[in-house]
Amino acid sequence: MSDDKKTRCDIGQVIRCVVDENDLDGEQRRHLDECPVCREELRRLEGGLRRLEHTAAEYTPGPVRRPALPVEESAQPHRPAFGWRLAWGTAFSLALVMLIAVWALFRGGLSPESYQDVAREMAEDEMLLAEVIVLEENPLPDAYREISPEETSGIDEEIFDFIVPVEGWSTDQESGTKEV
């Protein structure tokens, strides 16, 4: 066989022919009809597909029961029983919730003792808030405050310029202004 025949034989063309013969153009179809290598490959692929079909049919179990289409229901008048049940259930639940809320409101009532409890809780809340404000300013405990450096340890703009210098800017030491 010539090298020209070998280069024109493409397994992809044979597979496309097996899948859909109309997918190939006239020249490719003519090549598959004339080329003995491609015809043999096509025959081999189709034979393998037929064997697969028979094997699948042989080993596939049958349905457990016969499939049946649903039968249309007779024309009985539609009763909205579910709608009424839902409405009564919702109304009963709402009434029960309201009854529990009213019972809880009038059972305890607001007595002078409860006003005093509220005032005491407000005073405790104010003390807690004052403690939080103090901790915001300096969160260290007293024992650590003694060994920690002073808050005003000389941190100013020059330290930040030293750590992260901005290109093109220089600090004038005498005037304290920045020049470009």
Image (cartoon, rainbow, N blue to C red):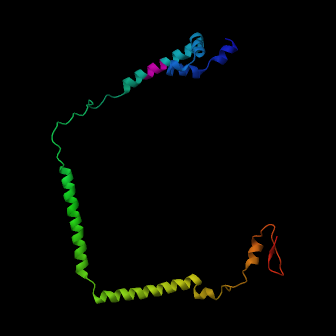
Whether residue 154 appears in magenta in the rendering, the answer is no
What secondary structure prevails in the magenta region?
Answer: helix
Q: Is residue 88 above or below residue 58?
A: below
Whether residue 138 appears in this view of the structure is no
Q: Hey, which quadrant is residue 99 in on the image?
A: bottom left
Name the residue located 44 percent from the left edge and 23 percent from the top edge: 52
Q: Is residue 70 above or below residue 1?
A: below
Which quadrant of the figure contains the C terminus? bottom right
Name the residue located 19 percent from the left edge and 55 percent from the top edge: 85
Name the residue located 73 percent from the left edge and 80 percent from the top edge: 156
State the image coordinates of residue 1 (x, y, percent, origin top left): 67, 11
Q: Is residue 119 left or right of residue 166?
A: left
State the image coordinates of residue 71 (x, y, percent, origin top left): 22, 33
Whether residue 43 appears in this view of the structure is yes
| Total marks placed | 0
Direction left: furthest residue: 76
Name the residue located 21 percent from the left edge and 67 percent from the top edge: 96
State the image coordinates of residue 97 (x, y, percent, origin top left): 24, 68
Q: Nearer the viewer, residue 14 or 103?
A: 103
Q: Hey, which quadrant is residue 7 in on the image?
A: top right
Q: Is residue 113 above or below residue 79?
A: below
Give the magenta-colored segment's residue range: 47-52
State the image coordinates of residue 63 (x, y, percent, origin top left): 30, 30
Q: Is residue 169 above or below residue 144?
A: above
Whether residue 48 appears in magenta in the rendering, the answer is yes
Q: Nearer the viewer, residue 178 or 153?
A: 178
